[in-house]
Image (cartoon, coloured by chain):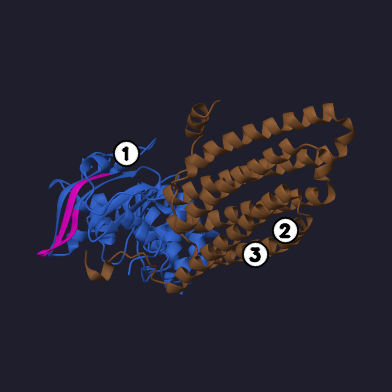
Chain colours: A blue, B brown
């Protein structure tokens, strides 16, 4: 068991080493500030391609802030400043020449509360491909909508309801619709910010099953407050605390025998 | 670290702490019953005390009942709490330790049955009986050490117990040879001698169970299993 305190760089480099997996996302020395308040401190984290990485930690630890650095969602917060280096597929995503809209078209995002557009089921999924001008013909768009809904495990449930409002679906269906909407633009990365926190156990199980299937084609990073969910769906887990990355490693290791005592205290429910 | 997020030995959910303590206390009690059974075995063997042996056979029911109750508690904790990390290791290992202790109870019962049904005096082999008593004492020592470790949440004696088990195995082999010699020399005493085989076997197996508990305790404390490499190292150190 290591003592409390900052991890030294050597250890962090060792932990960041992703075995047998290419790192699609590489973060080095990422600091985030909201005005004068620093929210993230020197985060070094690699995220492997086509695997699921869970970000866990108590509320306010910075995991969602970190997630939103990956698709530059923090840019929309005026007082937010991001420093350090984040590369996706070796490209510095904070370089001034980067087209943020194009960047976000490569990164799908699913939020805590299902947020379908006030449009039909069909239009929710077709919206992204149309917006980015990627599909021009109706037949191709129909095929893309069907394929996306199938991949989201929703097609059989909504194929006869494509014209109905997305908001008429159940909560779990709405969340899978949002996932279908996210993958319709063929992203390489899907970010999920507590995607099951508003869902019942059955809908949660369906989303988890879906995550397991999607990981073969997408790099998924998920923020979750459920330790069991992190253990079930992810191959790697990163524990954040007070804006610092305390420990990252194979999920099995983190939940069976973490190296850091703060991680152990958190995953066993000993934070008072 | 701010006060709102301080680390603590206690869980936020205090009833979880109570359940874990209840489970640990139960395991310590079960270990105590196994120790008593083994102490009775030693005395029954040494004194050819059939009454004590019968009491020990009867007392095994208590061990079995407590083991079942602990299994039930473990099952409930897993279902209700979904423990993680050191809690998970502790709860998972509780199932194994309780089974090892229950098996020790069974083996003590087995020895006592041989004492009651056999006729140790007619074996006319006081040296073998002495060797069995010594074997029992060695096994007792191992069990005492591993249960002390378990109760204190330490793994300081794991490797010592492992080394002791190699000596126990060696004593067991010597006892078997001695019984075989006795049978050759005194074929008329074969019916009294054969139960000694079983007694030796039960005692050797109790030593194995103590070693198993040592391994589990090491896993609980360190999160790592005692690898085969370390075992081979110990075996090499202990070759006679």
Of labels 3 and 2, the one closer to you: 2
Residue B93 visible in the current orientation: yes
Q: Position of residue B80 (x, y in %)?
A: 53, 68
Say above or below: A220 vs B179: below
The residue beneath circle 1 is A17
Most common secondary structure along the magenta stretch:
strand
Q: Chain of mark 1?
A: A
Q: Chain of mark 2?
A: B
Q: Is residue B81 magenta?
A: no
Q: Name which residue lies at 43% across and 51% down.
A: B154
The residue beneath circle 3 is B66
Q: Name which residue lies at 37% across and 69% down.
A: A113
Of labels 2 and 1, the one closer to you: 2
Residue B28 - label? none
Left or right: B196 in relation to B236: right
Q: Name which residue lies at 67% across and 61% down.
A: B63
Q: Magenta region: which residues?
A: A26-41
Q: Are marks 2 and 1 on the same chain?
A: no
Q: Nearer the viewer, residue B102 or A244?
A: B102
Q: Secondary structure at mark 3?
A: helix
Left or right: A88 in relation to B184: left
Label 2 crowd (10 A; few <14 / some 14-19 / many >=20): many
Q: Nearer the viewer, residue A67 or A132?
A: A67
Residue A161 visible in the current orientation: no
């Amino acid at each position: 068991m290591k003592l409390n305190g900052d991890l030294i760089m050597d250890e962090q480099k060792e932990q960041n080493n992703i075995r047998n997996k290419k790192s699609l996302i590489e973060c080095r020395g990422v600091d985030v500030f909201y005005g004068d308040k620093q929210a993230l401190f020197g985060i070094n984290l690699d995220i492997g391609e086509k695997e699921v990485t869970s970000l866990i930690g108590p509320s306010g630890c910075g995991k969602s802030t970190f997630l939103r650095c990956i698709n530059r969602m923090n840019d929309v917060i005026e007082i937010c400043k991001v420093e350090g280096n984040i590369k996706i597929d070796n490209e510095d995503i904070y370089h001034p020449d980067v087209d943020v809209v194009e960047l976000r078209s490569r990164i799908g995002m699913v939020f805590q509360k299902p947020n379908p557009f006030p449009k039909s089921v069909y239009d929710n999924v077709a919206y992204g491909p149309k917006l980015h001008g990627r599909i021009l013909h109706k037949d191709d768009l129909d095929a893309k909508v069907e394929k996306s809904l199938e991949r989201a495990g929703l097609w059989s449930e909504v194929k006869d309801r494509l014209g109905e409002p997305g908001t008429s679906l159940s909560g779990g269906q709405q969340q899978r619709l949002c996932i279908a909407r996210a993958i319709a633009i063929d992203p390489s990365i899907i970010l999920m910010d507590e995607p099951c926190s508003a869902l019942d156990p059955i809908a949660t199980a369906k989303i988890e099953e879906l995550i397991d299937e999607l990981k073969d084609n997408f790099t998924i990073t998920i923020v979750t407050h459920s330790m069991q969910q992190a253990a079930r769906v992810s191959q790697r887990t990163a524990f954040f605390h007070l804006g610092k990355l305390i420990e990252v490693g194979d999920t099995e290791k983190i939940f069976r025998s973490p190296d850091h005592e703060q991680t152990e205290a958190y995953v066993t429910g000993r934070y008072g | 670290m701010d006060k709102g997020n301080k680390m603590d030995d206690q869980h936020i959910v205090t009833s979880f702490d109570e359940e874990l303590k209840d489970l640990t206390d139960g395991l310590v009690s079960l270990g105590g019953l196994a120790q008593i059974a083994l102490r009775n075995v030693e005395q029954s063997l040494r004194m050819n005390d059939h009454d004590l042996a019968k009491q020990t056979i009867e007392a095994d029911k208590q061990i079995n009942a407590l083991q079942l109750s602990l299994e039930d508690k473990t099952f409930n904790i897993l279902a209700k709490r979904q423990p993680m990390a050191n809690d998970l290791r502790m709860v998972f290992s509780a199932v194994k330790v309780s089974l090892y202790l229950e098996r020790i109870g069974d083996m003590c019962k087995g020895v006592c049955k041989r004492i009651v049904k056999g006729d140790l005096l007619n074996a006319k082999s006081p040296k073998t009986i002495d060797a069995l008593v010594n074997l029992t004492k060695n096994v007792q020592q191992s069990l005492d050490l591993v249960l002390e470790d378990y109760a204190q949440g330490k793994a300081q004696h794991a490797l010592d117990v492992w080394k002791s088990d190699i000596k126990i195995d060696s004593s067991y082999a010597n006892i078997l040879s001695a019984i075989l010699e006795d049978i050759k020399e005194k074929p008329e005493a074969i019916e009294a001698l054969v139960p000694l085989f079983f007694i030796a076997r039960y005692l050797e197996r109790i030593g194995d169970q103590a070693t198993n508990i040592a391994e589990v305790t090491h896993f609980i404390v360190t999160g790592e299993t005692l690898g085969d490499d370390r075992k081979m190292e110990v075996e090499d150190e202990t070759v006679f």
